[in-house]
Amino acid sequence: MSRKRVPGPLAGRDFRLLYTSTVVSGLGDWLDQVALLVLVITVWHGGAGDLALVVAASMLPLLATPFLAVLVDRRQSRRVLILTDLVQAGLTLGLVVAPGVYWAAGLVLVRSALGSVGGLAGQIQLRVSVPPDGVQAATVLLQTAMQSVKILGPALGGLLIALMSPRAVFAANACTFLVGVIAASALRTTSSPSRNTDLHYFRELGEGFQHVFGSRLLRSLLFVMCSLMFVVFLYDSMAALIVPALGMGTSYIGYMVSAVGLGGVVGSLLMGRFAARLRPFLTMAGSVLVIGCIIVVIGFAIVREIRIDSAIWLCVIFLLGIASAGILVTFPSVVHSETPVELTGRVWALMNSAPAVLNVLAPALAAALVVWVGLGSLLLLAGAALLLTALVVAVRLGGVPHTAPPSGADDGAGRTDGPTPEPAPLNSGAPHRETRAPCVKRAGSSTEEITMADKIDKLAEAGFSLTDANDAQQAVLKSLTEDEVNVLLSVKSRVEAAGSDVEGHSVSDPSGGYLW
């Protein structure tokens, strides 16, 4: 009975490993970020230019991820995760002995690029570790965990720096990458390499772009996220000015970060409970509407020099964190629902890198606008832009229903023709059985397919030949639930009982036979 209390995706062994690795790595990243800033400022006595250099080094690789994604899709996700975590562990140890800010920036640049590659492999691994209808639940769990880490990480990083040197914190973060290596090595499933490895690199790269811009939903989502992230970074980059402008001390900057993180945890939990009943773009529009209203209120308070108790502002920021979960959960859910497994790396990279370009430009524009119109007016403009975005999304895309991720076949929903689809993963996370997707290799095995569960044996014993069926038919049979299998066997037995032995089978042409 206690098993039923475990969230569906966490009941699957591979997702538990991926989840553990992601959480530990996320915690290490926050420790590392705090330690790096302290090292630049207090040890190397760097200024604003040095800080900007380190931040730019961590952001620039995001722009290259669409071009690296082709290489990720060509490899097994498990191998990519192991390799990137191993190299990142070594680079992080390099920060322990880095002599200055330029060395550190170079190490951060390469490590960030590998982190982006590992992130793409993690998204692919997610798709083969849970069934299509479990992707949203898995996304909610990961988002909840990362928001929790956002609260714990900075506080723990500050504590460790107080007890140890910043360089010792880098050594601790290197250990978190080794945890990722161990977890990835224990994975039983992994993605199959792209079947189009014989194609030219740029043709494979183009498949990702064609898929995104050939899908109305992905095009719309990309436009919405670019607009949204640009506006968010306009005011988010000015957080250090907003807090004192509201009459709070600088220490409240950290409190604000924690309030947003705590709100994100609560919002992710709410999304996990109700997301399946909500329309994704309508949910996103509602979230943007709430965030826009909050930013307008903050901007109005700054313009009018209204002073409110700091505890109230923390509650307002907590509400902002709750609202943000509607975007942070909806975005990956829609991307996965519109993307076949074999294109996950390329599509995910493009959908994330395009907003990143605008994130780099937004702070510079924000600084100019603050000088030109003032901080409060900047927030009012940003809030108005968010409200307009919410209205457009609700009107143009609010009626789009939630859909499960595809197995890769063209369903006529605007996807471009691509490689032959891989069947959908079957690991349902049920405690009494463990099934796996066809064409998904067992780690360390030389065989192409993983042995299926008892339900597949039942089909074979009843005369359903999986070897004679085509790929699409195999995918259908292997995705049947236990109840569907029993119904199919019952119908087949009744058909055979009504006639001769050959009337229930088609030996010569299984693709056109009646119940094979």
Image: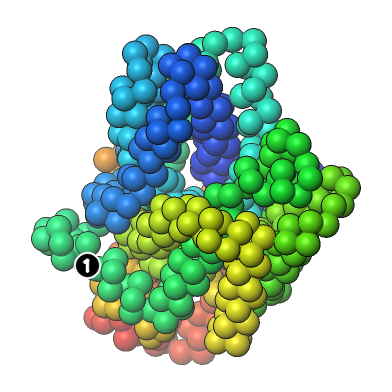
Q: Count of labels shown?
A: 1
Choose between 241 and 109: the one closer to the eye.
241
Position in image of residue 475 (x %, y %): 40, 68
Nearest the viewer among 418 and 289 is 289
- Camera-nearest residue between 337 and 69: 69
- Scheme of image coloration: rainbow
Q: Can residue 277 be seen at all in this image of the molecule? A: yes
Residue type at tag 1: Gly
Location of residue 168 in the rendering, given as x and y in whole percent from the top left corner: 51, 12
Please report the residue visible at 58 percent of the width from the left and 37 percent of the height from the top. 23
Give how far across and how far down residue 300 sits, in percent.
75, 64
Q: Residue at x 20, y 62 (%)?
A: 204
Nearer to us in this view, 418 or 496: 418
Res. 470 in view: no
Question: SS of the residue at dot 1?
Answer: helix
Which residue matches tag 1? Answer: 206
Figure check: 379 above or below 315: below
Relative height, residue 82 to residue 289 (above, below):
above
Percent position of residue 317, x then y: 75, 52
Q: Quadrant of residue 106?
A: top left
Quarter of the view holding residue 400: bottom right
Q: Which residue, as the protein is rendered here, is positioned at the far front? A: 372
Task: Assess disc 1: are there few (<14), some (14-19) or many (≥20) residues with their C-alpha within 10 Å of its C-alpha.
Answer: some
Residue at (15% x, 62% y) in the render: 202
The residue that appears at 76% across and 36% down in the rendered structure is 249
Rendered image quadrant of residue 376: bottom right
Judge from the rendering whether residue 84 lies leftward or rightward of residue 142; answer left or right: left
